[in-house]
Image (tube, rainbow, N blue to C red):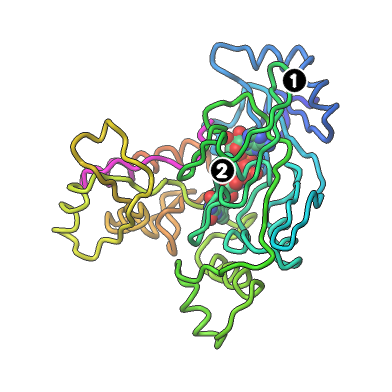
Amino acid sequence: MDKDFSLRELNTFGFDVKARYFQELKTMDDVRELIKNPEFIACRNATVSRLLVLSGGSNILFSSEFFDGFVVYPNLKGIEVLEETAETVKIRCYCGEVWKDFVDYTVAHNLYGLENLADIPGKVGAAPVQNIGAYGTEVKDTIHQVHTIDLTTGETKVFSNEECRFSYRNSIFKTTKNHLIFAVDFILKKHGDLKLDYGNIRNYLIANNITNPTLQDIAATVKAIRAEKLPEVGVVGSVGSFFQNAIVPVDKYQEIKGLYPEVPYYQVEIPPLPSVGRNDKLIKIPSGWLIDRAGWKGYRENHVGVWDKQALVLVHYGGGQPQEILDLMKKIQDSVKTKFGVDIKPEVNIV
Ligand SMILES: Cc1cc2nc3c(=O)[nH]c(=O)nc-3n(C[C@H](O)[C@H](O)[C@H](O)COP(=O)(O)OP(=O)(O)OC[C@H]3O[C@@H](n4cnc5c(N)ncnc54)[C@H](O)[C@@H]3O)c2cc1C
């Protein structure tokens, strides 16, 4: 166990945060040892939890420069083919594998399902937590089951896809913080349909004279489009999309459409929540569009700002403090609320 450990390399915002306690876990025995550690037990049992499971730190914003608690860094490695049929391959991938390398592995082996999720930062163990998604694909569609160990009891539990309760940028693991995910089983297809109708994929293929795209072409296209649009990890600090897309009742969408006929939208597939009341449909509006229309794209204030190529991305240019991002977040939320009457929520985990 390390004390006062610097997390600067372990959060893609690049803030110089220190953790009171830090422990890397490379094996299941390391996990079992950890849960006997007195400092760990004290932090886990504190009234307000002072325990954080940290992987790539690409979806975490530390709210101050000192994390007065215990950071657990699961780093179990390995990729195993478990089962193969004429149509599918079942693969187990351990939590410490880098997500984009795992996607590259599947694409190189001609396995369909993860190609649109190429180049998302972070580790495999975090992918189920917020059900990562991009370009019309969510990881839930390829996850067979998730292997966890309870950080309170040391018991292992396997969650079926259904038990993970996946939804848009959400799963059971976002709220039940005591489950450490140590491996994920995926079922990938040997033959599949490519998803071209999201973002700029089709336009990019046309512009590059690719008429009959392969699986490898799609992964390469997604990488190229992402590289044009998003800050490069390690160069400009960010967590990708800082906010979730807004989900609004149909009459709110129509009110906005009355003023801005060009407002983009998507039907929401999840059943409406009872709290939504008489509206029987929900509409998703890209928060990037709302933030852009509220005038924030390219805004900069001292060490932080809004990325000029994608308004959903807040950036840290270096030398700043987490509070600057929190202040900017609040200003943007207030301005979107004033202009459109819509609340936008952070996608990032603020700890
Ligand atoms: C430039 C950029 C682009 C991005 N693009 C996308 C995108 O297109 N789509 C998308 O969905 N996300 C995107 N993200 C966000 C991020 O990459 C994903 O959410 C990723 O899955 C986070 O992985 P991580 O390993 O960095 O997790 P961390 O940030 O370390 O953790 C994220 C959450 O998962 C928990 N967690 C981490 N590991 C485990 C584990 N083993 N067991 C249990 N809980 C765990 C943490 O406690 C935390 O709550 C982007 C981020 C950046 C910086």
Name the spot of residue 155 as percent of width and height, x first.
73, 21
Decide if residue 300 is on the left or right side of residue 215.
Answer: left
Disc with the residue nearer the chain's start (1 vs 2): 2
Q: Is mark 1 within 8 Å of ligand 1?
A: no
Instruction: Name the residue: 30% across, 54% down.
Output: 290
Decide if residue 163 is on the left or right side of residue 152.
Answer: left
Crowd band around label 1 with a 10 angstrom C-alpha radius: few (<14), some (14–19), many (20+):
some
Residue 150 in which image quadrant: top right
Q: Can residue 196 be found in the magenta stretch?
A: no
SS at circle 2: loop
Q: For residue 204, say whether it is visible.
A: yes
Name the spot of residue 217 as percent of width and height, x first.
63, 75
SS at circle 1: loop
- Residue 33: which disc? none
Indicate the amino acid at tag 2: Asn
Question: What distance separates the C-alpha of mark 1 from that of mark 2?
Answer: 26 Å
Looking at the image, residue 281 lies above or below residue 232: above
Q: Is mark 2 within 8 Å of ligand 1?
A: yes
In the image, 22 versus 341, the foreground residue is: 341
Indicate the amino acid at tag 1: Gly
Find the magenta span and give its range. 332-351
Decide if residue 150 is on the left or right side of residue 249.
Answer: right
Name the spot of residue 220 as percent of width and height, x first.
63, 72
Residue at the farthest front position: 86
Q: For residue 16, say whether it is visible.
A: no
- Residue 59: which disc? 2
